[in-house]
Structures are given as C-alpha cells and as structure tokens.
C-alpha cells in the first residue's frame, strides 16, 4: 500500500556520515499539521531516554549545533559543525505533541578526516591482492 507524502508525519535519513572536524546538515521533513509545534534534536540509544541537544523556537545556546524550522517547507534542519568522534551515535528528530511525540531516528557516523581510503583489489589473472588508495 502506498502512502501519500502528505500523510507521513516525519521523515529523516536513517544514517548520516560526517568527517572528524567537518560538518553535517540533517533535514527532517514533517507533515504541515505540525507547523506550529515545538521541534527538537536529541541524542540517545533509545528515544524515551534521549537528551535534548537543541530545541525550537528558542535555540539553546550551543556553539556547534543549531536547529531551524522552515515552517513553509515543513522541514527541521539541524546543523552540526566541528564534528568529533564523540558526536557519533543515535539522534532523534522530534516533534512535541499533546499525545505521544512524533520522532524519527538518525544514526550519525563519524570517520577520521585525512586518512587514506584503502581498498583491497583482487586481480583475476594472478589471484593476488593489490592495495589501492584514493589519496596516493
């Protein structure tokens, strides 16, 4: 059964990848009925126990993480800068409601910046393995 996009309450990317020292922008699309609700970004393995990182309409003071609510487009935009390995983990886009909050999980993966990507390549002719690097 197909659902119209308008019937989806909240859509978020399942996995977002960032680099150590870099930045990511995560967009969570929501149903227009939630235009005036408070939105927040929280971190934790389980939604019920997650810790709020930033929240609308008053963005908590945080030098590296911001949240914006584009009410016309129906999108929550979270920007995280100067990423560190400690930023990796499970996050949640959340819309506060009078009943059960609407939430969608986003897993953030952080890779080390500046490390060459090494890919083993097996050649059929010799059945030997070569090492290939994108940065050499």
Image (cartoon, helix red, strand yellow):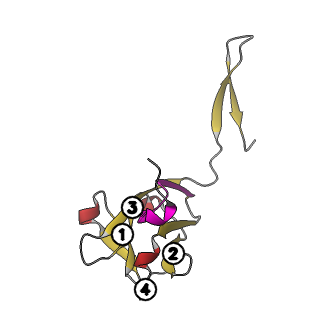
Residue segment shown in magenta: 5-18
Q: Where does label 3 land, which residue?
A: 104
Say which residue appears at 30% left-offset and 76% top-offset. Answer: 97
Q: Position of residue 56 (x, y in %)?
A: 41, 83
Say which residue appears at 64% left-offset and 33% top-offset. Answer: 119
Is label 1 in a helix, a strand or a loop?
strand
3 and 4 marks in contact (CB < 8 Å) = no
Q: Where does label 1 land, which residue?
A: 42
Task: Please rate how many residues cluster around mark 3, counting C-alpha atoms within 10 Å: few if below 14, some from 14 to 19, many from 20.
Answer: some
Task: Please rate how many residues cluster around mark 2, counting C-alpha atoms within 10 Å: few if below 14, some from 14 to 19, many from 20.
Answer: some
Q: Position of residue 65 (x, y in %)?
A: 48, 75
Say which residue appears at 47% left-offset and 61% top-offset. Answer: 12
Task: Please rate how many residues cluster around mark 1, counting C-alpha atoms within 10 Å: few if below 14, some from 14 to 19, many from 20.
Answer: some
Mark nearest the camera among 2 and 4 is 2
Mark nearest the camera among 2 and 1 is 2
2 and 3 marks in contact (CB < 8 Å) = no
Task: Please rate how many residues cluster around mark 4, counting C-alpha atoms within 10 Å: few if below 14, some from 14 to 19, many from 20.
Answer: few
The disc at residue 61 is 4
Q: Quadrant of the C terminus?
A: top right
Is label 3 in a helix, a strand or a loop?
strand
The CA distance from mark 3 to mark 4 is 23 Å
């Amino acid at each position: 059964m197909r659902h119209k996009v308008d019937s989806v309450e909240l859509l978020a990317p399942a996995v977002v990848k960032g680099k150590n020292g870099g930045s990511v922008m995560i967009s969570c699309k929501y149903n227009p009925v939630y235009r005036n609700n408070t939105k927040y970004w929280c971190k934790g393995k389980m939604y019920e126990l997650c810790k709020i990182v930033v929240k609308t309409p008053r963005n908590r003071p945080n030098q590296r993480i911001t949240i914006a609510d584009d009410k016309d487009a129906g999108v929550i935009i979270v920007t995280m800068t100067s990423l560190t390995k400690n930023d990796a983990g499970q996050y949640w886009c959340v819309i506060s409601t009078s009943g059960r909050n609407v939430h969608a999980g986003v897993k953030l993966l952080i890779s080390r910046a500046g490390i060459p990507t090494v890919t083993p390549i097996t050649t059929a002719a010799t059945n030997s393995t070569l090492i290939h690097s994108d940065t050499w």
